[in-house]
Image (cartoon, rainbow, N blue to C red):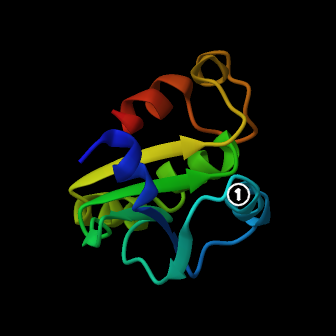
Amino acid sequence: MEFADLLDTLTIVVDSREKKNDHIIEQFKSRSINYEVEKLDWSDYSFKVDSKDYTSIIGVERKRSLDELGANISKHRYRFARQLDKSEELYLMVEDEQWSNIVRGRYRNNVNGNSYIASLF
């Protein structure tokens, strides 16, 4: 199967508990990207390709900001670590941010920059 043909069979799966993602859903619609909403056990997004379900293997965890991510690795660390432990392959997406903002301390939580980076790796 050619790559383009494979993409035609791609369906993005959006966790039914995902909040404040209307802008993402609108992008899917405007670009005619197939998607469906269902409960995912450990990620915000995953996918299916050619009827093969990858939702229990690969996922994307979306954070709206470094502040939200900082809360997950500090105040909610245990819950976040459990979520990571459930995953085989989890990708982290922080919207509208750059890694340099962590190094420069451009976030509004009390997580030390070095601790922030160490927690992510």
Q: Quadrant of residue 98?
A: top right
Quadrant of image for the C terminus: top left
As helix, strand or loop, the secondary structure at mark 1 comes to helix
Of 2 and 54, the residue lying toward us = 2
Residue drawn where x is 57% and y is 81% of the image = 16
Residue 82 in percent (x, y) is at 31, 66
Residue 40 higher or lower than 52, as above or below: below
The count of marks equals 1
Left or right, 22 with respect to 71, comes to right
The amino acid beneath tag 1 is: Ile
Residue 83 in percent (x, y) is at 35, 65
Residue 38 in percent (x, y) is at 49, 83
Of 47 and 70, the residue lying toward us = 47
Left or right, 64 with respect to 52, comes to right
Residue drawn where x is 58% and y is 80% of the image = 17
Left or right, 104 with respect to 44, comes to right
Of 23 and 116, the residue lying toward us = 23
Residue 2 in percent (x, y) is at 29, 42
Crowdedness near tag 1: few (<14), some (14–19) or many (≥20) residues, C-alpha within 10 Å: few
Residue drawn where x is 43% and y is 65% of the image = 43
In the picture of the structure, the residue carrying the numbered disc 1 is: 24
Residue 88 higher or lower than 108, as above or below: below
Left or right, 34 with respect to 42, comes to right
Of 98 and 117, the residue lying toward us = 98
Residue drawn where x is 42% and y is 50% of the image = 7
Q: Quadrant of residue 57?
A: bottom left
